[in-house]
Image (cartoon, rainbow, N blue to C red):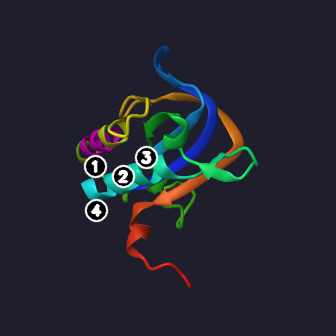
Amino acid sequence: MRALVQRVTGASVTVEGEALGSIGPGLVVFIGITSADDAADAEYLANKIANLRIFSDDLGRFDRSALDLGAELLIVSQFTLYADTRKGRRPSFTDAAPPEQAEALFAKTVEMFRSTGLKVETGRFQANMLVNIANDGPVTIFIDSAERKQPRRG
Protein backbone atom coordinates (compact mmCIF):
# COMPACT_ATOMS: atom_id res chain seq x y z
CA MET A 1 0.00 0.00 0.00
CA ARG A 2 1.30 3.41 -0.89
CA ALA A 3 0.46 6.81 0.52
CA LEU A 4 1.34 10.25 -0.74
CA VAL A 5 0.94 12.62 2.21
CA GLN A 6 0.70 16.38 1.79
CA ARG A 7 0.60 18.85 4.65
CA VAL A 8 -2.09 21.43 3.91
CA THR A 9 -3.67 24.55 5.30
CA GLY A 10 -6.93 23.31 3.81
CA ALA A 11 -8.32 20.97 1.17
CA SER A 12 -11.59 19.83 -0.36
CA VAL A 13 -12.89 17.20 -2.74
CA THR A 14 -15.85 17.40 -5.12
CA VAL A 15 -17.42 14.98 -7.60
CA GLU A 16 -19.55 16.38 -10.40
CA GLY A 17 -20.02 19.61 -8.48
CA GLU A 18 -21.03 17.86 -5.23
CA ALA A 19 -18.85 18.78 -2.26
CA LEU A 20 -17.92 15.52 -0.51
CA GLY A 21 -15.50 16.69 2.11
CA SER A 22 -13.30 19.53 3.22
CA ILE A 23 -10.71 20.01 5.91
CA GLY A 24 -8.82 22.82 7.54
CA PRO A 25 -5.17 22.47 8.56
CA GLY A 26 -4.00 18.89 8.34
CA LEU A 27 -3.05 16.24 5.83
CA VAL A 28 -4.29 15.10 2.45
CA VAL A 29 -3.49 11.40 2.07
CA PHE A 30 -3.68 9.75 -1.34
CA ILE A 31 -3.86 5.96 -0.94
CA GLY A 32 -2.87 3.40 -3.58
CA ILE A 33 -3.58 -0.29 -3.07
CA THR A 34 -2.02 -3.33 -4.72
CA SER A 35 -3.24 -6.94 -4.76
CA ALA A 36 -0.73 -8.04 -2.11
CA ASP A 37 -1.96 -5.49 0.47
CA ASP A 38 -3.98 -6.45 3.52
CA ALA A 39 -5.25 -5.07 6.83
CA ALA A 40 -1.71 -5.05 8.27
CA ASP A 41 -0.66 -2.61 5.52
CA ALA A 42 -3.68 -0.40 6.29
CA GLU A 43 -2.90 -0.43 10.01
CA TYR A 44 0.75 0.39 9.38
CA LEU A 45 -0.09 3.39 7.17
CA ALA A 46 -2.79 4.77 9.45
CA ASN A 47 -0.50 4.55 12.48
CA LYS A 48 2.57 5.88 10.64
CA ILE A 49 0.74 8.85 9.11
CA ALA A 50 -1.20 9.87 12.23
CA ASN A 51 2.06 9.90 14.21
CA LEU A 52 4.36 11.31 11.50
CA ARG A 53 6.07 14.41 12.88
CA ILE A 54 5.81 16.77 9.90
CA PHE A 55 4.25 19.79 11.59
CA SER A 56 6.50 22.51 12.93
CA ASP A 57 7.00 23.28 16.59
CA ASP A 58 7.63 26.79 17.95
CA LEU A 59 11.24 26.62 16.72
CA GLY A 60 10.24 25.63 13.18
CA ARG A 61 11.41 21.99 13.51
CA PHE A 62 9.30 19.06 12.34
CA ASP A 63 8.36 17.87 15.79
CA ARG A 64 4.56 17.58 15.89
CA SER A 65 2.21 14.99 14.46
CA ALA A 66 -1.38 15.16 13.25
CA LEU A 67 -2.37 13.54 16.56
CA ASP A 68 -0.41 16.12 18.56
CA LEU A 69 -2.27 18.96 16.85
CA GLY A 70 -5.69 17.40 16.28
CA ALA A 71 -5.17 17.94 12.57
CA GLU A 72 -7.82 17.00 10.01
CA LEU A 73 -7.39 14.36 7.30
CA LEU A 74 -8.70 14.11 3.76
CA ILE A 75 -8.20 10.54 2.51
CA VAL A 76 -8.48 9.94 -1.25
CA SER A 77 -8.16 6.65 -3.11
CA GLN A 78 -5.65 6.93 -5.96
CA PHE A 79 -4.78 3.81 -7.94
CA THR A 80 -2.35 5.84 -10.06
CA LEU A 81 0.20 5.59 -7.24
CA TYR A 82 0.88 2.15 -8.72
CA ALA A 83 1.58 3.45 -12.23
CA ASP A 84 4.34 1.57 -14.01
CA THR A 85 6.08 3.91 -16.45
CA ARG A 86 9.10 1.75 -17.33
CA LYS A 87 7.90 0.84 -20.81
CA GLY A 88 6.36 3.08 -23.43
CA ARG A 89 4.63 6.38 -22.86
CA ARG A 90 1.33 5.24 -21.42
CA PRO A 91 1.46 4.15 -17.77
CA SER A 92 0.34 0.66 -16.88
CA PHE A 93 -1.77 0.14 -13.78
CA THR A 94 -1.59 -3.66 -13.60
CA ASP A 95 0.01 -3.48 -10.14
CA ALA A 96 -3.04 -1.72 -8.70
CA ALA A 97 -5.53 -3.97 -6.94
CA PRO A 98 -8.81 -4.75 -8.71
CA PRO A 99 -11.55 -2.27 -7.72
CA GLU A 100 -13.54 -4.72 -5.55
CA GLN A 101 -10.49 -5.64 -3.47
CA ALA A 102 -9.18 -2.07 -3.33
CA GLU A 103 -12.51 -0.59 -2.26
CA ALA A 104 -12.84 -2.93 0.72
CA LEU A 105 -9.28 -2.28 1.88
CA PHE A 106 -9.63 1.46 1.31
CA ALA A 107 -12.74 1.46 3.53
CA LYS A 108 -10.79 -0.47 6.19
CA THR A 109 -7.96 2.07 5.97
CA VAL A 110 -10.37 5.00 6.40
CA GLU A 111 -11.89 3.21 9.41
CA MET A 112 -8.40 2.88 10.94
CA PHE A 113 -7.74 6.59 10.42
CA ARG A 114 -11.07 7.41 12.05
CA SER A 115 -10.18 5.23 15.05
CA THR A 116 -7.38 7.71 15.85
CA GLY A 117 -10.03 10.26 16.82
CA LEU A 118 -8.99 12.72 14.12
CA LYS A 119 -11.57 14.29 11.81
CA VAL A 120 -11.50 12.29 8.57
CA GLU A 121 -13.12 13.22 5.26
CA THR A 122 -12.96 11.20 2.04
CA GLY A 123 -13.61 11.38 -1.63
CA ARG A 124 -15.69 8.82 -3.54
CA PHE A 125 -14.06 5.56 -4.54
CA GLN A 126 -13.59 5.14 -8.31
CA ALA A 127 -14.97 8.59 -9.08
CA ASN A 128 -13.35 11.34 -11.09
CA MET A 129 -12.64 13.77 -8.26
CA LEU A 130 -11.55 17.37 -8.14
CA VAL A 131 -9.22 17.75 -5.17
CA ASN A 132 -8.31 21.30 -4.16
CA ILE A 133 -5.21 21.48 -2.01
CA ALA A 134 -3.52 24.41 -0.30
CA ASN A 135 -0.16 22.71 0.17
CA ASP A 136 1.67 23.97 3.26
CA GLY A 137 5.44 24.19 2.96
CA PRO A 138 5.19 22.42 0.60
CA VAL A 139 5.62 19.22 2.56
CA THR A 140 5.01 16.01 0.60
CA ILE A 141 6.01 12.57 1.91
CA PHE A 142 5.79 9.21 0.10
CA ILE A 143 5.27 6.09 2.22
CA ASP A 144 5.18 2.49 0.98
CA SER A 145 4.02 -0.12 3.50
CA ALA A 146 6.25 -2.74 1.84
CA GLU A 147 9.28 -0.84 3.13
CA ARG A 148 8.42 -1.76 6.73
CA LYS A 149 9.67 -5.27 5.95
CA GLN A 150 13.05 -4.04 4.70
CA PRO A 151 15.95 -3.38 7.06
CA ARG A 152 17.12 0.20 7.37
CA ARG A 153 20.41 0.96 5.73
CA GLY A 154 23.08 1.43 8.26
- In three-dimensional space, the C-alpha distance between marks 3 and 4, rounded to whole angstroms, equals 14 Å
- In three-dimensional space, the C-alpha distance between marks 1 and 4, rounded to whole angstroms, equals 11 Å
- Counting residues from the start of the chain, the first of labels 1 and 4 encountered is 4
Q: Secondary structure at mark 2?
A: loop
- Counting residues from the start of the chain, the first of labels 2 and 1 encountered is 2
Three-letter residue code for mark 3: Ile
In the picture, the disc for residue 33 is 2
What is the quadrant of residue 136 in the picture? Answer: top right
Q: Is residue 79 left or right of residue 8?
A: left
Q: Residue 29, how many percent across, how many down?
A: 49, 42
Three-letter residue code for mark 1: Pro
Give the residue number, with chain letter if any, for mark 4. Answer: 36
Q: Secondary structure at mark 1?
A: loop
What is the quadrant of residue 135 in the picture? Answer: top right
Q: Residue 137, how many percent across, how many down?
A: 73, 43
Three-letter residue code for mark 2: Ile
Indicate which label's residue lies in the foreground, 1 or 4.
4
Magenta-colored span: 102-110
Q: Secondary structure at mark 4?
A: loop
- In three-dimensional space, the C-alpha distance between marks 2 and 3, rounded to whole angstroms, equals 7 Å
- In three-dimensional space, the C-alpha distance between marks 4 and 2, rounded to whole angstroms, equals 8 Å
Q: Is residue 28 left or right of residue 106?
A: right
Indicate which label's residue lies in the foreground, 2 or 1.
2
